Image: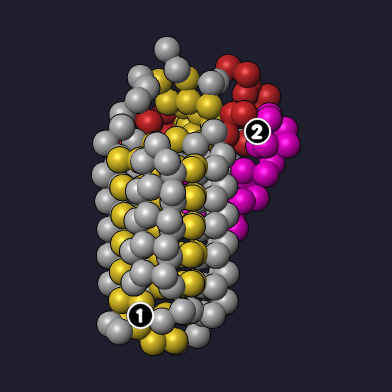
Amino acid sequence: MKRVAIFGMGGHGVSTLDLVASNVDLAFFFDDSNNVKIPKQIRQGSLDDLIIDHKKFDQIIVAIGNNNLRKKYLQIIEEKCGKHYLSSYSHNSSIISKYSQLSHGSTVYAGAIINSFATIGKGSIINSGSIIEHDCIVSEYSHIAPGAVLCGAVKIEGYCFIGANSVILPNLHIGRNSVIGAGSVITKNVDADSVIYGNPAKNNS
């Protein structure tokens, strides 16, 4: 029986509980905070406890929605436990082309679609019902929120957040550390460090 440890018991941890439930019978939760959404009775301990006990598990998932915090904890766990514990993880209802590539620490949630020759960078989240079309690149530590659509050959630089139900038209480039608001339609390239929202989207950074 596969044993999965999940670090992070906030809102994204709740989604990750459903992610692992599709594939395994046993999930174990760890968090350094007492302010958690998942019932405390199933909490296993802190990050230090996870590092001490990591050999008890087959895989570790960092369930933190914030891109920078997710990077921080993924790097700690990789250094202390080993990269092989952080292989990509996908819900069994997701559709992932055999010609796509998922990097370590990436997660793909229920109903998401990743099509041919798409590349998902390390530590990135492809959330529920999102669509990553052919030849797209989602770079490291980015978060594609539920229902977002990346049309063909879109490139998302690292540390971006693409809001729920937003649409990015084909062949566009989204600069590093940018935020796309929920429900936005992106019709032009987006510079790094931008905050964009609306239909059609406008720069509000």
Q: Whole-Å distance between the Cαs marked 2 and 1?
A: 38 Å
Read off the magenta span: 62-83
Q: Amino acid at mark 2?
A: Lys
Q: Nearer the viewer, residue 74 or 132?
A: 132
Residue 80 colored magenta? Answer: yes
Near mark 2 (Cα within 10 A), the count class, few <14, some 14-19 or many ≥20, is: some
Q: Quick one: label 2 or label 1, which is nearer the N terminus?
A: 2
- Is the magenta region chiefly helix, strand or loop? helix
Near mark 1 (Cα within 10 A), the count class, few <14, some 14-19 or many ≥20, is: some
Query: Is 4 left, or right, of 109 in this rendering?
Result: right
Give the residue pinned by disc 1.
187
Give the residue pinned by disc 2.
83
Question: Which residue is at a point 57% across and 76% down the rendered structure image?
Answer: 192
44 w.r.t. 31: above or below? above
For residue 98, say whether it is visible: yes
Q: Amino acid at mark 1?
A: Thr
